[in-house]
Image (spheres, helix red, strand yellow):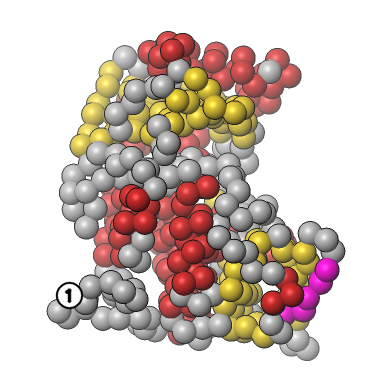
Amino acid sequence: MTTSSHSSIRREYDALVVGARCAGAATAMLLARAGLRVLAVDRDREGSDTISTHALMRGGVVQLVRWGLIDRLRATGTPAVRSATFHYGDEALPFAVKPRDGVDALYAPRRTVLDPILVDAARAAGAQVVHGAALAEVVRGASGRVEGAVIETLDGARARVAARIVIGADGARSRAARLVSAPTERAGRHACGVVYGHWSGLEVEGYHWYYRPGVSAGAIPTGDGRTCVFAALPRPRLLDALPGGVDAVYREVLAEAAPELAAALGSARLDARLQPFPGIPGFMRRAWGPGWALVGDAGYFKDPITAHGITDALRDAELLARAVASGTEAALAAYQAARDAASVELFEVTDRIASFEWDLEEAKGLHRLLARHMASEVELLGALDVVCVPGQPPLPSGASCGYSSS
């Protein structure tokens, strides 16, 4: 893949997207498909990895199907996931992934796989995507409205870009959110600490989620014959344990949460090093303002214990792209209202699970509630009109194409 150079950045765009991973690349793709002139920039190297749970829930797969990208994901060898098993202590509850909503399997791609697919699709739609470049400043007009930004490359070169809207898609610690002073409108109270690694030689069928009092774990099949295995625990316990070594706390928590999984790792091989994430409490920021908007973790972050972040990002990318394409502040306000309506209950349930202040019966109830909210999210996506995809078969009779302000 070719990374667009800083020297090719023009002076003016309809939309500038800061961040080109799940949320940013998807937003750029959809805006470009709607005919807007789009620049997306990302500080990281193209195709690089990032901290991630990998797992796509049904809503995330629905989006890749709707956008015409699911075959590209399947072609990478990312395995189809057709079951999920919840382990509560010694009790195992398996669930099949039922074919519906155009989805017959779930997927958990590495970010080195998913992000490039979305970047390639954004470029194919006409968006310009530049890696190794980051937001330095926002540019405001006399009224205070954001009218563009200053972009800075890793070597310190700067370019001033005018844009009708600047979209922050640069993660939970978003510089864009800070520069536009986006207020936090809802805050979580809890945060998990997580340590994960990728293992080869580990036979796992479907997603596996493990829960015991005070700890959790999971096994998520991803590409290249690897399985992502994570151990989760309250943030204070992880911080207290880290001086003793990441490997020690990882194996200790796995032995507590999932003894059979911990034993199975004895015949598997860890690829690279373990990755710790000390956790941060979730939040929901104001999602838009005069000349700016936020999407993905920049606007809404919840604890990774429910592995729903990528699905949220793909959902909100489309809600925002539709609003931006309509060109009105009323549409941006409607974007936030839709995001919040789809997210608040998921946010609260996730925060409760992340507290680890539950017994196993309550944990079961929380997961049933989570499943109901995720089903509502899929219904929301199913109600959106079908997006035209160049090169794809004709749309079904009665389907609409493109974006509307409705």
Q: Position of residue 221 (x, y in %)?
A: 38, 34
Quadrant for residue 275, please give it. Answer: top right
Q: Residue at x 34, y 33 (%)?
A: 207
Q: Which is the main secondary structure of the residues drawn in magenta? A: strand
With respect to residue 275, does 156 lie above or below? below
Q: Is residue 162 visible?
A: no
Vertical placement of 338 versus 214: above or below?
below
Residue extending furthest toward the left = 397
Say above or below: 352 vs 265.
Answer: below
Residue 396: x %, y % from top left = 17, 75
Read off the residue under disc 1: 396
* Residue 219 seen anywhere in this rendered image of the structure: yes
Give the residue displayed 68% in from the left and 18% down from the top: 245
Q: Residues within 10 Å of mark 1 (few under 14, many from 20)?
A: few
The residue lying at 42 percent from left, 36 percent from top is 224
Which segment did they paint magenta?
157-162
Residue that sits furthest to the right in the current view: 156
Going by the numbered disc 1, the residue's amino acid type is Pro
230 or 360: nearer the eye? Answer: 230
Of the 4 image quadrants, the one containing the N terminus is bottom right
* Residue 264 coordinates in the image, percent (x, y): 40, 14
Q: Residue at x 61, y 56 (%)?
A: 46
Residue 331 x %, y %: 46, 80
Position above or below: 216 against 337? above
Quadrant into which the C terminus falls: bottom left
Relative to 312, is 142 on the left or the right? right
Q: Is residue 292 magenta?
A: no
Q: Quadrant of residue 263?
A: top left
Indicate the secondary structure of the residue bearing disc 1.
Answer: loop
Q: Is residue 372 left or right of residue 8?
A: left
